[in-house]
Amino acid sequence: MTPPSRGPCPSSTATPDTDFLRSQADALLACDFLETVTLSGARMYVFAVIEHASRRIRILGATAHPTASWVTQAAKNLAMDLEDTG
């Protein structure tokens, strides 16, 4: 015996992903490390954040040895900067 067929789920309350992302763009930040090598050959890790609403890139800092405490402090500094700018 086959189960009764069901249609697609009603989407009256659901919004497409793109609509959701556009509506939340002011609050979305993406962060990542970029790896680079200096002229002297030292390997550095640059911590960068992209603000989706303005497409602004913020360089939070660079270090040869990123640690959890270093990243936490950089994130706190960003949060304070964002509060200051409103």
Image (tube, grey):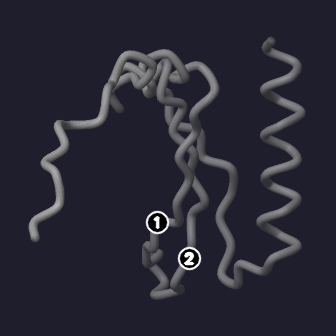
Quadrant location of the N terminus in the rendered image: bottom left
Pick the front one: 28 or 67: 28
- Residue at the extreme top: 86
Classify mark 2: helix, strand or loop: strand
Left or right of 76, for residue 64: left
Q: What amino acid is labelled 2 in the image?
A: Met
Q: Depth-wise, is mark 2 or mark 1 nearer the camera? A: 1
Q: Residue sitting at 65 percent across and 64 percent down?
A: 62
Q: Characterize the local packing of mark 2: few (<14), some (14-19) or many (20 or more) Cα atoms within 10 angstroms.
A: some
Left or right of 70, for residue 50: left
Q: Label for residue 3?
A: none
Q: Residue sitting at 37 percent across and 16 percent down?
A: 12
Q: How many marks?
A: 2
Left or right of 79, for residue 26: left
Classify mark 1: helix, strand or loop: strand
Q: Which residue is mark 2?
A: 44
* Comes first in the chain, label 2 or label 1: 1
Q: Which residue is mark 1?
A: 34
* Quarter of the image where one finds residue 78: top right
> In the image, is residue 29 above or below residue 12?
below
Quadrant location of the C terminus in the rendered image: top right
Please provide percent x and percent y for residue 29. 58, 39
